[in-house]
Image: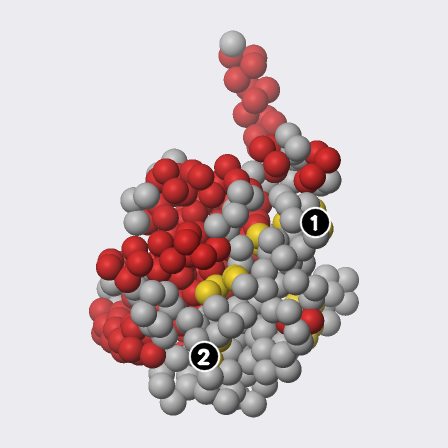
Amino acid sequence: IIGFRDSWQDMLAVLPNDSDWGRERAVYVLVHQVPDGYSVHNWDPLTNIGSKTGHSDDPMWLVLGLIEYLKESGDLVFLDESVRYYDSGSETVRHHLFKALDYTLAHMSDRGIPLIMAADWNDGLDYVGRQGRGESSMVAGHLAWMLREVASLLWFLGSDSLAQHYLEQRDKLIRNINQHLWDGEWYIRGTRDDGEAFGSSRNIEGRIFLNAQSWMVISGAAPRSRAIRCMDSLRKHLSTPYGPCIFMPAYQEPDPKIGIITRFAPGTKENGTIFCHPTVWAIMAECILGRGARAWEYFNQVLFINRGKDPDLYKAEPYVFCEFVDGPDSAYFGEGRFSWMTGTASWMWKVCLDWILGV
């Protein structure tokens, strides 16, 4: 037994520590932030050449990743470590964190809602805000969530005045969200440059979007009554046997005021499909509301093991998630597409541990 224990300890000594690896990845993301707080959208790992595309969600993922690393590791001294920026200069990690938050807070519409700019998480919404006026409800929810998380961190660190500042910004944002983005039964997905809403009951196509509902629940921006109502609307209008659609109805004609998402064939890519990645956020939202049975239902509907039991329809590997499953407007409704090409797996792992299991 002693010999086995010693061998095990010898093996562990050469394995990377998860916290060390997490810190390395955090630094890897931070060094792709520019001094104004924005983050390079993507980069070539060989040349390190990146693109500043103007996607509005990029700074928020940096904040989320850093917060999750700090909460898992307890490595608060990391906040005082100096890390360089992508193009010039360096500052402490905490300054990187604050600059990401402040960048999004500085890019708001006249109504106090984050601008969508080039697009947000949904790259297909690439003409909604090209003129600098379109809004994103998903980034609004993301920002509200991160303001809460950073304020909690600051309280823990004893930086009460700065924590209070970010909480005041959060309260103001939540008031604006519920004043301007609530549509009566659900939250709109955003507004275009011309001020018209999309993801609204007033739209014929793209009337209700999944992300606009789940992120308002995740962030705590939606009051309990609206949280229940918007997630019930999600279920009513977006449910399929293979999971909830990313939005419905699908766009049938190209719309230059929305973007490339309207140019995908109906029921394919992001145009009215079961996009697996945002399904995870619906599962998380239902867990937050305490509706575990509904979360479990969505989980099982998109799970590759279950879908793989019908290989003639699914036509994808039964051991990885697909990016999307063809939606109701496709002649191939239920068929899996672009396996391996998705962030679903890592998010599903996290949501299973943190929310379904409650760890």
Q: Which mark is residue 278?
A: none
Q: Which mark is residue 332?
A: 1
Asked if labels 1 and 2 touch by Cβ distance under 8 angstroms, the answer is no
Q: How many marks?
A: 2
Of 104 and 100, the residue lying toward us: 104
The three-letter amino acid code for the residue at tag 2 is: Ala
Residue at the (52%, 68%) spot, across then down:
206
Of 243 and 138, the residue lying toward us: 243
Answer above or below: position of 154 versus 341. Answer: below
Q: Secondary structure at mark 2?
A: strand
- Viewport quadrant of the C terminus: top left
Colour convention of the picture: secondary structure
In the picture as drawn, the residue positioned furthest to the top comes out as 1
Q: Secondary structure at mark 1?
A: loop
Residue 181: percent from left, percent from top: 36, 75
Residue 106: percent from left, percent from top: 42, 84
Kindly identify which residue carries mark 2: 197
Badge 2: residue crowd in 10 Å (few <14, some 14–19, many ≥20): many
Residue 199: percent from left, percent from top: 47, 71
Of 298 and 11, the residue lying toward us: 298
Residue 245 visible within the image: yes
Q: Is label 2 or label 1 in front?
A: 1
Which quadrant of the figure has residue 8?
Answer: top right
Residue 58: percent from left, percent from top: 54, 70
Residue at the (58%, 73%) spot, across then down:
125
In the picture as drawn, the residue positioned furthest to the right comes out as 46
Q: Earlier in the sequence, mark 2 or mark 1?
A: 2
Q: Distance between the Cα atoms at labels 2 and 1?
A: 30 Å
